[in-house]
Amino acid sequence: MENMDKIQELESELQALKNKVSNLEEDLRKAEVRIQTMSTSQTTTSSYTYSKPATGVPNGYMQPVSAPNAASTGTVQNPYWNRPAQNPYVNNTAQNTYVNSATRNPYVNNSAQNPYVNYKAPQNMQQRVPVNNLSTESWVGKILMGALASLLIFIAFITFAKLLLPYITDTVKIILMFVASIALTAAGYVLSKKKPENTFFKALLGCGCACIYLSIMVTGIHFKAISLIVMYVLLALWAGLMIVFANGKSDWLFFAIGNLGYFVSVMFTAGLKDIKLVLPMLIYIVVVGVVYQIMYWKNESQRDLQCIINVFSLLIYELVVSVKFNDAVEVCITAAVAIIWASAGFLIYMLSDLFKYKKNNFYFASIYAFAYLVAYFVLSGLLDFPVIMTFCAIIIPAVVFEVISAYWRINNLTKDEVTVSAVFSGFLFTVAAVFLERDKNIIFTSGIIMILYASLIIYGLFRKDSFFKLKGWILLAICMFMGYEADAGIVFFAVAAVLSVVSLIIEGYVLNDSSLFKLVSYGFLLFTIIRIGFMTSDFPAFAGKEDEVCLVTYGIMSLLNLIFILAGFYKTNEKDNGKNCHIVLDILNVMYMLAGMWFMAMVDGDLFKAIYMVIVFALACINIPVKENGSRYRYLYSGIKLGIIIFYSISTFRAPEPVISMCMIAFAVLCIAIGFKNRLLTKELRIFGLMTTLLFVIKFVVFDISFDSSVMKALSYLISGILCFGISAIYNHFEKRAGNDNSGQGQNYQN
């Protein structure tokens, strides 16, 4: 039967080709008649003789003369006189290729050598006649009109059914539905077989198939004339009928009709009331899905779409039965099938990309991963799985995504999908950590989760890949933030501190090629030190010793800043030699100084104040330029910050006002003296010293004169006066020395 059908199809194609060839021959005959008419109108009977061409006339073009003479009609062989000229534009009987002649004129009908007249192409040439693409008009007329015709027939079917409904019984209604549907399907099938190129007949066949589907559904759901099992068996047979009618692997009409019916039938499982029907319906969904998957496997687009339809059909069915029957065994089996199906699809699509990148496969794998997670969480909500099991279920697809991303990145296969994969897997890693943190699981509180996520940083260090290092640090930051909020424990942050120190050593002294990750490691270390300090103060053993814990924490952080600046931690192999890192360390240095000054004001004991003061002075002195290697503004900055710290420290210890003024004037004298060391670089520092002296002299006279102790006032005035004389002496000394050094050159001290 199959061979007979194929023979009929071949005969139809042969007949169509014969029709096209006959049309082509008719067109050629019309063209020949037109050409003959044109050539006849151009033919002339007059005879011309030609003279020698004038200068500038191209060779082969004869110049006509008024009349021949005797000389030119003799036997002399003049190449330019009275001979048949080779003019391709004038009719002659010799070599004119454009006028009807006995020569090789390809455009005029003749019986000699014209290849375009009475020409019959070989059969293989006739089969290669090009076919024009389907025009818009043809598409509307053939395809769209056919679809609209099937729609109108379907509406008419429903309208007639409404008119007849009040007068017939349910049995007659069912019979009429099936008779009309089958008749419509049969008519469409027969007509489409006779004329397969006519899309209207195919649309008619699709309309009949849809009517059969609706008849089965109405018979089972509305009339309840058949059981649910019988209805789904008939629907399965109908699905097989769609495969039979799909004439070719790329038939999208029956692909759409079949899958629409399949998906709608899954939606109607919401009407299930008997739990015994759950597994039979599951078998129906799986079997039809597998059959469709095999049928449409060779066409890539249909295969991918069928995969998505199948997995979402299973997912919807799982949701339906879980809502209706909760945690019954049948529901668990359905959920397990959905999880296995989705996870298998995810692995197939992802592993197929392991050695050959295909963009679509990645996104289909992501859809499967989403379906897998939804199916798992539905089942987990019903059975209350342990957290460790949920963690493993989430972490597996995340690891697969990460491995594929690493392979793509190593082989430079793609960039956009690597970013998408990183975001997706990072989201899964975060969700897994959230479940562990809420459960206070030991994997989280012990810091094991951070060690696992730090493997991304280790891989990034090994490969020298900033992408994976940055992702690993982001995951660690999320874990540390969750631990900070939930008070994960001292062990958790101790592990974080160790990871930060190890990364700091590798980034700062082994590789030393990235200021960014050097600072990231440093920042995480500082965060862990602060958190450990707060947690330590909450221990019963340190109750009431908050000031000591705060001092130790602050001292460790300040000591790290001092060590890193002195040891040149900011230096890197980058082009700027770690300039940005140096700026960050200087900013932290200022912040530590301000924090130390704030702690000095907050603590009560003088011993704590003194220790903070020493630490602040050490921080302030670490950036003082030595050996004349600083800029003029760095000298000025050092003078200003030291002046502020001295004034604040003395004030914090509640020293008398005259003593404060006297100390500040002494500091100003020191600034002026240092300012003469390098006159070009330290001019601003000298000016700062003079301004400070004037400011505190005014303070002496205006504010400090109200001291009750005349001895204290006298002593303060005496010392301040001596200091002012010292300033004058310093200026005179250096000005005189400058004048002696520059004598003979006409230079005076002007700095």
Image: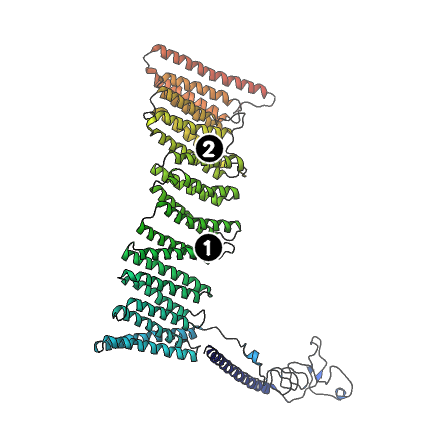
**Colour logic:** rainbow
| Left/right of residue 232 with respect to residue 684 in the rendered view | left
Residue 585: mark: 2
Cα separation between marks 1 and 2: 45 Å
Residue 312 is situated, as x and y percent measured from the top left of the image, at 36, 59
- For marks 1 and 2, the one nearer the N-term is 1
Of 658 and 3, which appears nearest the observer?
Answer: 3
Residue 586 is situated, as x and y percent measured from the top left of the image, at 46, 32
Is disc 1 surrounded by few (<14), some (14 to 19) or many (20+) residues within 10 Å? many
Of 154 and 573, which appears nearest the observer?
Answer: 154
**Residue at the right extreme of this rendering:** 76
Three-letter amino acid code at disc 1?
A: Met
Is disc 2 surrounded by few (<14), some (14 to 19) or many (20+) residues within 10 Å? some
Residue 304 is situated, as x and y percent measured from the top left of the image, at 43, 62
* Visible residue check, residue 444: yes
Task: Find disc 1 in the rendering and name its residue.
Answer: 350
Q: Nearer the viewer, mark 1 or mark 2?
A: 1
* Visible residue check, residue 431: no
- Residue at left offset 71%, top offset 76%: 55
Judged from the image, the secondary structure of the residue bearing numbered disc 1 is helix
Of 492 and 88, which appears nearest the observer?
Answer: 492
- Residue at left offset 53%, top offset 19%: 735
